[in-house]
Image (tube, helix red, strand yellow):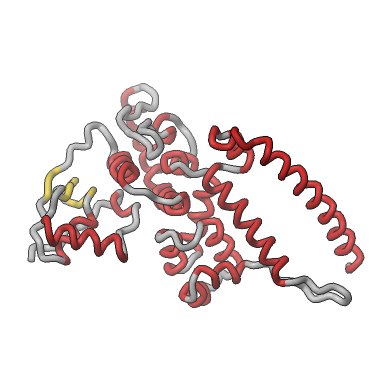
Amino acid sequence: MAKELKYHKAADLFPLMVGDDFAALRKSIQKKGLQKPIEMLDGKVIDGRNRYRACRAEKKQAKTVKVNLNGLTPLEYVLVANLERRHLTASERAMVAARSVDMFKEQAKERQKAGQRKGGGDRRSAKAKTASGGKKPKAIEGNGKAVTEAGEALGVSGDTVRKAKKVQDEGARAIQKAVEQGDVSVNLAAKFVKTCPDKTRQAEIVKKGPDAVKAAVKPKGKASAGLSVPDWFLESLSLVDGTLDAIREEHGGMVAMFRSKAFKPRIKECAAVLKATTNELVSANKEAQAYAQKQK
C-alpha cells in the first residue's frame, strides 16, 4: 500500500468518524468504491480524512485531487466543507471552535500584516459560509477576539467556546471524546473537570458512562440536625441546572430562546408558567437563605 498521507492541521479541527458512522462509510466504499476524491493542499489531506481512512481499511485505491480554495483560507475552506454536510451538536461545534482559536489568531495576524503591506484595512473573502443558512460567518466578516470569532463561525457563544477550551486544556482525553461524540454536553464536561481536576480520576469516571459524570458534579447534600435533604430534590435541581445549560448552549440564553419565532405561539403559556415557578423559587430561596444563616 502507498505511503500514508498526512492531514492538514485545519482538517484536524473536526473529530474523525467512529463507530457505526465509520462502519457505514467503510461498507459504502467497499461496495461502490470512492465516490469523491480526497482533496489535497500542500501535499496534505484538507478534506476527506474519513474517506481516506475507509479506503485504507478496505484496501481500496484512494484517488486524490489538488484543491482550489477559490480565495478562501484553509480554515475557511474546512469550516465550509464540514459544517455544510455534518450535523454536529452545539457541544461538538464548541469543541471544534476551541481547537480553532489559535488558527483564528494566526489568521488575524496574517490579515493585519497584509493590510499593513497594502496600506489598507482588513479584507476577507466573501465566499465563506456558515453552517446556519449559507451566509458568511460573522467571524470572517468583522474584527473581534479569536474566541468570539471562533464561536460565531461555529454558531456557539464565546462563553461556550471558553468552556470547551477548559475541557481541552484540563480534561482527560476520555472526557474530551465524550463531548466530541455527543455523549456529554460541553457545559457538563466543564463542570466535571473543575469538580474533578485529576485526569486519571476523570478517565475512571468517564469509563462508567455519562450518568457517572453527572453524578460527579451533582450537588452533595449536607447532613444537618432536623433536616434531611431527599436525593430526588438534589437530582431535580441538577436537572434544572442541566436544562438551563442546554438552553444557553443551543439558544444563547432563555431570553434569546423566547425571542425566537418558534416560541412566539406559546409565549403567553411559557410566561405564565415562568411567573408561577419564579414566585415559588423566590420564596423557597428566602427560606433556604434564612435557614443557612441560622446554621452559621
- Residue 186: % across, % down: 51, 57
- Residue shown at the point (34%, 29%) measured from the top left: 124
Relative height, residue 48 to residue 217 (above, below): above
Label tally: 0
Q: Which image quadrant is residue 220 in?
A: bottom right
Give 85 or 294, whichever is nearer the viewer.
85
Q: Residue furthest right?
A: 294
- Residue shown at the point (36%, 39%) measured from the top left: 107
Q: Is residue 66 left or right of residue 78?
A: left
- Residue 280: % across, % down: 80, 51
- Residue 182: % across, % down: 43, 59
- Residue 45: % across, % down: 20, 52
Q: Is residue 280 left or right of residue 260?
A: right
In which quadrant is the N terminus drawn?
A: bottom left
Q: Which image quadrant is residue 6 in?
A: bottom left
- Residue shown at the point (64%, 56%) measured from the top left: 241
Give 279 or 241, whichever is nearer the viewer.
279
